[in-house]
Image (cartoon, helix red, strand yellow):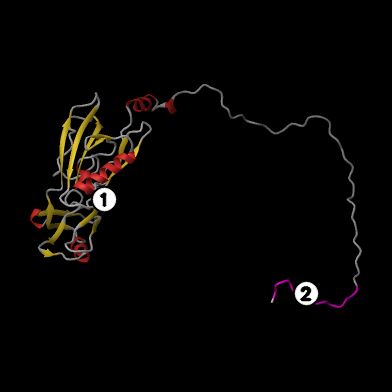
Amino acid sequence: MGDRLVESVIDVDIPTNATIGITLSNDQPLKITKLSPSSCFLGKLFVGDIVLTINDAKITNVGEFFKATKTPGKLHFRIKRDEYCTCKVNVLPAPKPGLESFEFEMNWRTGGMPIGILVYQDSEKRVIVSMIESGTLASQTLKPGDHLTKVNDVAILDKAMAKKMILDSVNAQNKVKLTVERQSQAAGSTPAPASTPPCAANNPKMPNYDLPLPPDVLAIMEANKAFHKAPFNLPSILKIVGPPTPSGSHINMPEVTPEENQIEFDPSAKPLKTTPKRVGAA
């Protein structure tokens, strides 16, 4: 595997009060296992990268890594990356107006690398990508809201089938082919190639988790967006209720002194008696 890794130098500018947001392996070589969405290294470093040096200083453990990255400024990372952990994008003919279709061929040189997606099944029983883990191979091409239609050219019927086929393919062959449909965007919406770092449309440090709404829902929202400004002529269901007015005849009841029942008792002194023990007491 060592001869398949490509060594390169990457420059990263660390701003003040930046979030490191990196999880590293405890074994050697030191490998990135997770990147948080707010990490300042998002788009520069990726899950699976092996960190060799920072500013020409050798990094051998997690403590050295965080010590070297806590100071703002430009850092020079020398890393090793498996360039065969790639994703090939094929643009397919549009299935119908308003939709685009893509085919993603994901390949891993070794096993144990996460694909990095969560899916759910909507009311129409479509399998939809709901969340993508930043820094993974899927984060470079897939988007939340993508409709997963096929795995390895086999049509998907439900979420359980999709998850099983993806896991089986990655574990057995270290590769998987996903076919997705996506709502059309502006021109140039073709997914970025594998060398392009993952980023969101609005914030380069945060993935976009907004799911696209159907056109009919957007039309209803647009037509009723000023509903609170329209005049309202119907009578209110709330009515002002005044104080109760007396009605009927008033009855005066005579005051009657309540009866008291006296219980007889003997107030004279009596000898004290020992309280018997409870059953089970010591």
Q: CA distance from mark 1 to mark 2?
A: 73 Å
Residue 163 x, y percent position in the rendering: 30, 43
Question: Which amino acid does the dot numbered 2 rest on?
Answer: Pro
Question: Which amino acid does the dot numbered 1 rest on?
Answer: Ser
| The N terminus lies in quadrant | bottom left
Residue 206 visible in the shown view: no
Quick one: label 1 or label 2, which is nearer the N terminus?
A: 1
Q: Which residues are magenta?
A: 268-281
Q: Is residue 280 magenta?
A: yes
Task: Classify 33 as above or below 234.
Answer: below
Indicate the secondary structure of the residue bearing disc 2: loop
Q: How many marks?
A: 2
Q: Could you say which quadrant of the image residue 216 lies in?
A: top left
In this image, 105 relative to 210: left or right? left
Task: Classify 59 as above or below 150.
Answer: below
In this image, 161 relative to 63: left or right? right
| Most foreground residue, 84 or 164 | 164
Q: Main secondary structure of the magenta part?
A: loop
Residue 115 x, y percent position in the rendering: 24, 46
Residue position for label 1: 38
